[in-house]
């Protein structure tokens, strides 16, 4: 009886393995990961996780392949572990960088790393965010890198490090709607007393400077986040 | 329990095997790391020429396993190994005849592996290739018959009116039109450049002594010299409006006075200038007519003019000529040509319903043929938009507000010109091929003023290939001026038509005349004998643009509607003869060229072709000083530092030839 049970169990296990293999096509066999970096500085290009830049791609070899996308994280990195080896077209045309021409890439089985060097639409330079009394003050400069003028500059605040134009409790904006000079100093402030109901004293919050250009599809360009205890 | 335990051991064993298999599979594949771009290369490479040495500087790569930098002089293959942190190397420039020098920088990592490398370039000349110009003299018969012409005079009398009142200067210009109608005897100096232009052409002239009154001594000298040519004085309403000191009280008064002066050999003056004449000049024999209250309304004034002059005004020239809101500070200079040619004059705003009705009547009455020219500039805030009205009535713009001494230069015989055709270069993916053009040459006052100064005084001209827009009509209007550009062009300049060919038109509005195809055929002839292979076209639908490409016989049509080319069908981008490229960014100030170049990313799949439009009076000048090429060179160098060995510069026609060859070879465009 004991022998029968063992044999039965082995058969069931074997069938389950065999069955799985037979019932499905091959699963994802490739990982595609990497980073979007600033062509000039070599630094990762800061992004926003929600409604931010995306990496669009099409797997070739199918009729009318659908356009898929993967999120680019706040630090400019991306990773998709559920890809299939094959020929792909990658499209970076709706981000906070100059539009790239479509890139043909062969994704091989296993890990595939790609660094996309891009030209950011704007660079936030010499940024500093400090708490001074009951005011958060951000000072910075903007380098307008391309022909797209600046629509708006902003300071965002949120308890999560993914603070951005989409993830914020408080924001302070200046509508620029024109070209900027790299020598100009900009200042944005958040009045803590006026926002005391959402920015609680004694709590820590992330602050981040963002700037958006006037291109229709353009996402914000950001400075690194700063954590400040109120 | 024992059974379960036994089964569990077995299951555990099987799972371990499976995990092992999976992990083996993963490590077999490894990381496909060949996809990385230039992230392990040096950055911000710069090459400067210092004391006949090429000094290469850079920023070390940010990767942590770099060991040293290998730099090779690609001219003679000498190599230097430079330790990290040094970020500088020097090479002797042994062959000084080259127009550019290339240096390859490779990063060596700790394992001795070399990076792909970056090529840094030192430019003495930014052209990808330089080709010789050909003899510009053409045997073709130049175009003719559209513009006023007169004859050369035996001697030229020069009157300096620079210190005269504005209101007197415009009167002098109108008088010059009558004086020069048959022979180009008089020449007015309203800026120093006008002397320069006489001297550049080697023309002998006599400076006429000014009078010694308290003001208007140039005008008074002109009057005294040529008084016998005039039979009348017309007093018009040119005094400033009390409610708007920048505008005359009656905006039509000057236009009507010009027409009357042209037809009656009269001198148009304001009451104040008339008073000056009465006090200081001998007016014996001159009839005086005051037209200040001659007509009850503006419409009545133009009705009168149409009734009086419609049959005697020029059939092919009409003038949008009035006193603009800067008439007291920057008076126009083109009025001599207005008067000499007896063109109909108006000063009306096409956006104003009443003015528009008057314009409709003028154009319907005059019924001008295809190829007719509208001189002057529009009254509307966007003066160019006068095209919206005039193009429908067969009128193409020849903007000319500050064109001076037109009646002097029109005395030179018409002349045709020729230029070499575009030459194709090899193009490849990863590169951006760029042509630049200086704007506004369709406007003949730019040809005579700003572009002339850039050609004459910009010491950096010739170091960057550029298209120079010019007016093809100069072959009849002012052949000496067009010849000046041909005579002085370097290998790095292509003379081209501006928007939109031999006249400035909006394609869609000219189409409404029903004579667009006729205009295109005429345009082809004028461009051919001007020697132009490149032209721009603004405000034209895809199909109207295609008609222009098909009929104008040019190599390159630059599309002024941003982004339209990208969405056009292939047959509208290249028709077998003419290539179409977006006219591109209009650059106003320093930084704009750099920003435009940074806006384009090289592609690993295809070469990219681009055109940039440099606004002559903005990009080319700073505080009245010519800075066009000095500024441009700084910008190109900055772009080269940031994206080394990426941008290749060529003349518009060479860009067209290269693109044509690329398309014919099956390339994606």
Image: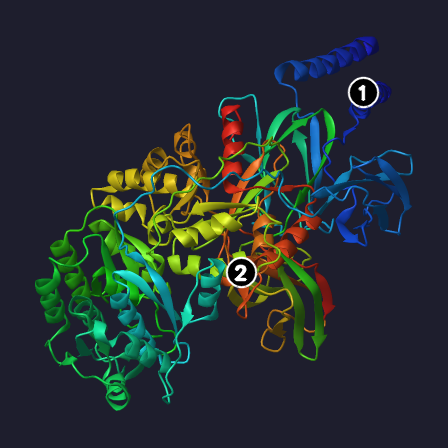
Q: Residue at x 85, y 48 (%)?
A: B90
- Note whether A50 is above or below A78 in the view shown: below
Q: Position of residue B45 (x, y in %)?
A: 76, 48
Q: Nearer the viewer, residue B130 or B550?
A: B130
Q: Position of residue B139 (x, y in %)?
A: 39, 37
Q: Nearer the viewer, residue B341 or B158?
A: B158
**Do we see residue B469 in this rendering?**
yes
Q: Which mark is residue B360?
A: none
Q: Nearer the viewer, residue B247 or A92?
A: B247
Chain assignment, label 2: B
Q: Which mark is residue B620?
A: 2
According to the picture, the residue beneath numbered tag 1 turns out to be B21
Q: Residue at x 12, y 69 (%)?
A: B299
Q: Position of residue A136 (x, y in %)?
A: 66, 73
**Do we see residue A196 in this rendering?**
no
In the image, farthest residue toward the left: B307
Q: Residues within 10 Å of mark 2 (few under 14, many from 20)?
A: many
In space, the residues marked 1 and 2 are separated at their CA atoms by 69 Å
Q: Coloured how?
A: rainbow
Q: Secondary structure at mark 2?
A: loop
Q: Nearer the viewer, residue B653 or B666?
A: B653
Classify the position of the N terminus of chain B by image quarter.
top right
**Between marks 1 and 2 in the image, the one whose residue lies nearer the viewer:** 2
Q: Position of residue B580 (x, y in %)?
A: 44, 37
- Note whether B243 is above or below A34 in the view shown: below
Q: Residues within 10 Å of mark 1 (few under 14, many from 20)?
A: few
Residue B579 found in image quarter: top left
Q: Identify the mark nearer the N-term, 1 or 2.
A: 1
Do marks 1 and 2 share a subunit? yes
Q: Secondary structure at mark 1?
A: helix
- Note whether B337 is above or below B646 in the view shown: below
């Amino acid at each position: 009886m004991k022998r029968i049970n063992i044999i039965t169990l082995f058969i069931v296990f074997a069938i389950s393995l065999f069955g799985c293999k037979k019932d499905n096509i091959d699963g994802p066999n490739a990982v595609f990961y990497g980073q979007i970096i600033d062509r000039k500085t070599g630094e990762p290009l800061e992004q926003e996780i929600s409604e931010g830049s995306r990496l669009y791609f099409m797997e070739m070899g199918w009729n009318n392949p659908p356009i898929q996308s993967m999120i680019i994280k706040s630090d400019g990195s991306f990773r998709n572990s559920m890809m299939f080896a094959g020929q792909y077209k990658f499209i970076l045309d709706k981000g906070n960088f100059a539009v790239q021409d479509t890139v043909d890439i062969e994704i091989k089985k296993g890990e595939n790393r790609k660094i996309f060097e891009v030209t950011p639409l704007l660079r936030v330079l010499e940024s500093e965010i400090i708490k001074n009394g009951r005011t958060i003050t951000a000072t910075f400069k903007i380098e307008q890198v391309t022909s797209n003028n600046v629509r708006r500059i902003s300071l965002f605040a949120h308890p999560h490090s993914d603070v951005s134009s989409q993830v914020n409790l408080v924001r302070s904006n200046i509508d620029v709607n024109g070209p900027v000079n790299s020598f100009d100093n900009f200042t944005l402030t958040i009045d803590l007393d006026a926002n005391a109901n959402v920015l609680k004293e004694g709590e820590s919050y992330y602050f981040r400077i963002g700037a958006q250009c006037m291109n229709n599809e353009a996402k914000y360009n950001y400075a690194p986040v700063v954590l400040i205890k109120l | 329990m024992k059974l379960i335990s036994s089964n569990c051991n077995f299951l555990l064993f099987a799972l371990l095997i499976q995990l092992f298999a999976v992990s083996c599979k993963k490590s077999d594949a490894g990381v496909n790391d060949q996809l990385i771009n230039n992230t392990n290369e040096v950055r911000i490479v710069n090459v400067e020429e210092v004391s006949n040495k090429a000094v290469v500087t850079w920023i070390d790569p940010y990767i942590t396993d770099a060991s040293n930098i290998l730099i090779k002089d690609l001219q003679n293959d000498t190599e230097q190994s430079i330790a990290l942190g040094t970020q500088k190397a020097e090479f002797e420039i042994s062959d000084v005849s080259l127009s550019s020098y290339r240096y390859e920088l490779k990063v060596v990592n700790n394992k001795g592996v070399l990076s792909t490398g970056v090529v840094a370039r030192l430019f003495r000349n930014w052209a990808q290739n330089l080709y010789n110009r050909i003899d510009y003299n053409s045997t073709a018969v130049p175009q003719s018959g559209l513009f006023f012409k007169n004859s050369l005079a035996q001697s030229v009398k020069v009157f300096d009116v620079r210190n005269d009142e504005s209101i007197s200067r415009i009167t002098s210009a109108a008088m010059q039109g009558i004086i020069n109608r048959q022979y180009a005897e008089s020449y007015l100096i309203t800026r120093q450049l006008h002397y320069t232009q006489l001297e550049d052409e080697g023309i002998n002239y006599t400076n006429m002594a000014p009078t010694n009154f308290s003001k208007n001594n140039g005008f008074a000298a002109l009057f005294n010299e040529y008084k016998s040519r005039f039979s009348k004085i017309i007093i018009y309403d040119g005094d400033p409006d009390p409610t708007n000191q920048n505008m005359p009280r009656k905006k039509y008064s000057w236009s009507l006075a010009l027409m009357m002066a042209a037809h009656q050999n009269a001198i148009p003056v304001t009451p104040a200038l008339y008073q000056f004449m009465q006090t200081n000049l001998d007016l014996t024999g001159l009839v005086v007519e005051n037209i200040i209250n001659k007509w009850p309304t503006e419409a009545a004034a133009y009705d009168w003019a149409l009734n009086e002059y419609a049959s005697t005004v020029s059939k092919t020239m009409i003038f949008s000529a009035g006193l603009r809101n800067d008439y007291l500070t920057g008076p126009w200079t083109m009025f001599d040509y207005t008067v000499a040619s007896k063109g109909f004059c108006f000063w009306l705003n096409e956006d104003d319903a009443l003015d528009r009705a008057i314009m409709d009547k003028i154009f319907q009455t005059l019924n001008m043929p295809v190829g007719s020219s509208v001189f002057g500039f529009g009254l509307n805030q966007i003066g160019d938009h006068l095209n919206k009205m005039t193009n429908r009535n067969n009128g193409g713009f020849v903007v000319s507000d500050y064109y001076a001494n037109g009646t002097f230069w029109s005395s030179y015989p018409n002349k045709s010109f020729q230029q070499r055709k575009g030459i194709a270069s090899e193009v490849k993916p990863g590169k951006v091929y760029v042509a630049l053009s200086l704007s506004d040459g369709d406007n003949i006052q730019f040809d005579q003023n700003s572009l002339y100064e850039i050609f004459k005084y910009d010491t950096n001209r010739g170091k960057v290939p550029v298209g120079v827009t010019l007016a093809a009509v100069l072959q009849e209007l002012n052949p000496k001026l067009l010849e000046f550009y041909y005579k002085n062009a370097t290998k790095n300049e292509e003379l081209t038509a501006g928007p939109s060919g031999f006249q400035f038109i909006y394609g869609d509005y000219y189409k409404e005349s029903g004579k667009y195809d006729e205009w295109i055929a005429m345009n082809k002839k004028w461009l051919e004998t001007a020697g132009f292979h490149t032209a721009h076209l603004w405000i034209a639908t895809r199909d109207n643009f295609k008609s222009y490409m098909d009929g104008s016989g040019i190599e390159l049509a630059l599309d002024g509607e941003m982004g339209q080319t990208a969405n056009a069908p292939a047959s509208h981008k290249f028709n077998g003869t003419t290539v179409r490229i977006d006219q591109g960014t209009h650059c106003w100030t320093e930084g704009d060229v750099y920003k435009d170049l940074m806006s384009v990313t090289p592609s690993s799949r295809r070469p990219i072709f681009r055109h940039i439009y440099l606004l002559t009076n903005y990009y080319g000048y700073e505080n009245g000083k010519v800075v066009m090429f000095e500024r441009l060179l700084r910008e190109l160098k900055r772009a080269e530092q940031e994206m080394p060995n990426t941008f290749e510069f060529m003349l518009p026609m060479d860009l067209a030839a290269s693109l044509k060859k690329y398309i014919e070879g099956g390339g994606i465009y």
